[in-house]
Structures are given as structure tokens and as C-alpha cells.
Image: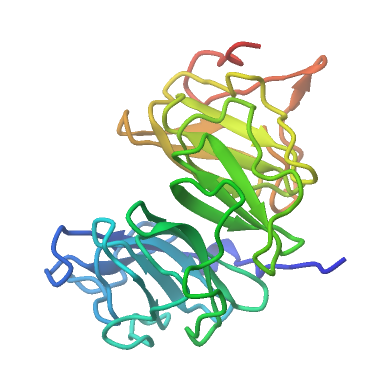
Amino acid sequence: MKRCFFRRISAAGVALFLVAITSLPAAAGNSVTELNGSNGNPLSPATGFIGGGLAGPVGVAIDSSGNVWVSNNANGLGNSVTELKSDGTPISPSSGFTGGGLAGPEGIAIDLAGNVWVANNASNKGDSVTELKSDGTPISPSSGFTGGGLAGPWSIAVDTSCNIWVANNAGASVTELKSTGTLVPGSPFTGGGLSGPKGIALDGAGNVWVANSAGASVTELNGSDGSAISPSGGFTAAGLSAPDGIAIDRSGDVWVANAGGASVTELLGVAKPVIKPSLTPGARLIGAKRRLSARQTPAPTAAND
């Protein structure tokens, strides 16, 4: 089986890249900000990094060379991807990289080969996934990869087998594609509390975690077959409110950004660590039922369990 392995970055070398969006594609504010990962201090200039076709930037990903890739949505009308060097210098042309079905791009991810995968959420042009080479040349057809239950694709992730996982915000489902862009049998996957899914992330076991914006919950799917691990109402915890983004740290803690609560929820030790920690996290299973522990919140519940 083909395997994908990803570069790990030490804590001392981490920097955070954020996008700034305005309603006008040509307006100031279409930029990328870099922050020091240790203390949050700005590394980019006051205007942020600009150029390279930035227009309503939404998603951001970093390749193995440290280059930064950004999806340009421009209020659902964008159709390009920008590439910047690690120092913020544009690599992509002034119009960005285009083609391959790019239409209202949202989430963006990069595979082992350096190919760039983008979830396209443009209702007037169809829902699709685009693949670009590391030089920005399209691999996917002009309509992108389609089918497989893609419906309002929002975010995207690549697993260790090089398969592509897409959260379908309008479909209450998750689509899995092979690295060739063809559908994995059984996909799209439903259940486990999927409701308006937005953010998607993979843990160290290859299981799929999804933030449900319409369900105030988090879903976990088995990465080997897409079956639901979380209960029918998803995992819930105090503070979850229109959850949007999701990420998993090296200790197996799940971090969720709450668009409806102006807050971040941390679920302690519930996922398989992405990098094995030196100290084992606290017990993750109590009896036969998985529990979630949210920092500084009352004990959460598994809805409809």
C-alpha cells in the first residue's frame, strides 16, 4: 500500500500563518499574516504579505519546503490559489494559479508529493475538488473531480494512505477520494452526528474528526472504512457553539474553534496523538464508552447516546 509521511516541525520552529479577508478582491487586507509560534508576535509586516493573486483568502497550508499555499475564495467568486515563499515573497503570478476546476475554493491541503488539493464550494459552478502540481499546473480536469456526494465541500485533509477526505457542509457527510481523484467505495460517509460539517482533521490512528457547525458537536469516523465512532448526536461539550475549525495536537488533544461563541474548546486526550508524547495522556476510555473532557468546562456528554 502506498504510504504518505509528513514532515514534523519542532515546537521551536513553528510559525503560524493566518489570512486576512476583505469583501473586495483588490482591496488592502487581502493578505497573509505570519505569527511567531512561541509567543504570537508578528513576523510579517504591518500590511501582511500580499501579492501572488491573493483575493479573499480563506484556507492556508504549508508544504514540505516551507512554502505557503492559500485558497482565494473572494466571497465565493474566486478561482485561484496563491503560493508564497516562507519569507512571504510571492511565487504564483499576479492572478494566482488557476484551472483544474477551481471555483469558490475553501479548504486546502498538500500531499506527500507536494500536490495541492482544494475543496471548491461554488454553488453556481458545481461542487468539486481540484488537484494542482507543486508548480501550480492543474492535474484535475477543467471541472475538477466531482461526484461522491460532494455537496458544499468546505474543508479537506490528506491521510497517510494519500486518500483525500472532504467535509460536505451542505451534505451532512464526508467524502473520501483516492489519490487519483476517484471515489473510495462506500463514500460518502454519514452518521456519527454529522450536521453542517466544516472543519476536518486526522489523528495519529488515521481517524477522521469533524467540527459540526449546525450540531454544536464533533464527529469521529473510522479512517479505515468511514464508519461512525461517535454516537448519533456526535460528541458534545460545554462551550461548543457553531464549531468551525478543528485540529489535533501531539498529545491527542482536539482543539475546536467556535464561530458562534468567540471561543476555543479543548477536548483533552480523546484522539490518537499525532506525535507520540513523552507522557501518556490521562485515561481516554471509561468502561466501553468514550468520554470527552473539556478544559475548564463541566463534563461533556455524548448527545443521543
Q: Is residue 154 above or below residue 181?
A: above
**Count of numbered circles on the image:** 0
Residue 269 visible in the picture = no
Q: Is residue 42 above or below residue 253?
A: below
Is residue 173 found left or right of 169 in the rendered image?
A: right
Point out the image quarter for the C terminus: top right
Residue 156 in the image: state x and y as whole percent.
Answer: 54, 55
Residue furthest toward the right? Answer: 1
Residue 73 in view in this figure:
yes
Residue 205 vs 137, above or below: the answer is: above
- Picture quadrant of residue 289: top right
Viewer-proximal residue among 278 and 102: 102
User: In x, y percent, where is residue 70?
Assistant: 39, 69
Tell me where residue 1 appears, x and y as whole percent. 88, 66
Report the front residue among 225 and 123.
123
- The picture places residue 279, in percent across and down from the top left corner, at 75, 42
Q: Quadrant of residue 288?
A: top right
* Applied colour scheme: rainbow
Q: Residue at x 30, y 68 (%)?
A: 32
Is residue 113 left or right of 80 when viewed as pictured? right
Residue 21 lies, with reference to residue 93, above or below; the image says above
Residue drawn at x 59%, y 48% is 201
In percent of the image, x 14 and y 72: which residue is there?
26
